[in-house]
């Protein structure tokens, strides 16, 4: 058993900086959040969350969308089943006007990360959901879900407004 005396474990590398990053992002300070994200990424360069947030923030704070996309895609290659990583890449696409690619990423996220409510909410904000097939039933009703999947196969995905 390894003991970490006087240092942080590899799992904790960059965690304090990443927490600061999230706080600055929540407070609406993307430039400061980017600095913290870069420090966290320096401590743990293969952490998919540090990669993804560094990418997102490079897009938000510096408008470096190509770098942002690359970092977010690298994060997804490391961990493809976490909704937040899809949300970050979709946000990068939206920020640079690539709405259809944002929709495509979110739809892939629904498949890979499960039907996460944050992904569904992001798709709703973009405005890509169609009316339920049977409008007198809730969209989660089994008939609407089945008929909606059939409509999706026949007609294809809804287009952004």
Image (spheres, rainbow, N blue to C red):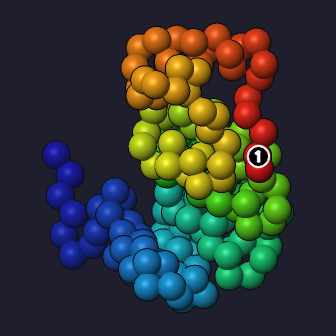
Vertical relation: 114 (above or below) 100: above
**Residue 14 screen position, x and y as percent:** 41, 70
Judge left or right: residue 47 versus residue 129.
Answer: left
Residue 38 position (above or below residue 117): below
User: Hey, which quadrant is residue 63 in on the image?
Assistant: bottom right
Q: Nearer the viewer, residue 121 or 64?
A: 121
* Image quadrant where residue 56 sits: bottom right
Q: Give x and y (percent) for residue 139.
A: 46, 28
Q: Secondary structure at mark 1?
A: loop
Q: Is residue 52 visible?
A: yes
- Say whether residue 125 is left or right of residue 97: left
For disc 1, the marked residue is 160
> Which residue is depicted at the point 42% across and 43% down?
117
Residue 29: percent from left, percent from top:
53, 88
Q: Residue at x 68, y 16 (%)?
A: 151
Determine the residue located farthest toward the front in the rendered image.
136
């Amino acid at each position: 058993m390894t003991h970490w005396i006087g240092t942080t474990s590899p799992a904790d590398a960059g965690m304090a900086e990443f927490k600061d990053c999230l706080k600055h992002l929540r407070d609406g300070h993307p430039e400061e959040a980017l600095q913290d994200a870069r420090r966290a990424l320096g401590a743990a360069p293969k952490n998919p969350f540090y990669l993804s947030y560094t990418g997102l923030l490079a897009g938000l704070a510096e408008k470096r969308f190509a770098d942002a996309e690359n970092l977010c895609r690298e994060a997804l290659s490391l961990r493809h089943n976490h909704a937040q990583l899809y949300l970050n890449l979709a946000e990068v696409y939206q920020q640079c006007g690539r709405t259809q690619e944002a929709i495509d990423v979110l739809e892939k996220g629904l498949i890979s990360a499960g039907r996460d409510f944050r992904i569904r909410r992001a798709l709703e904000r973009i405005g890509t959901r169609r009316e339920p097939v049977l409008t007198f039933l809730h969209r989660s009703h089994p008939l609407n879900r089945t008929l909606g999947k059939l409509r999706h196969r026949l007609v294809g995905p809804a287009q952004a407004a």
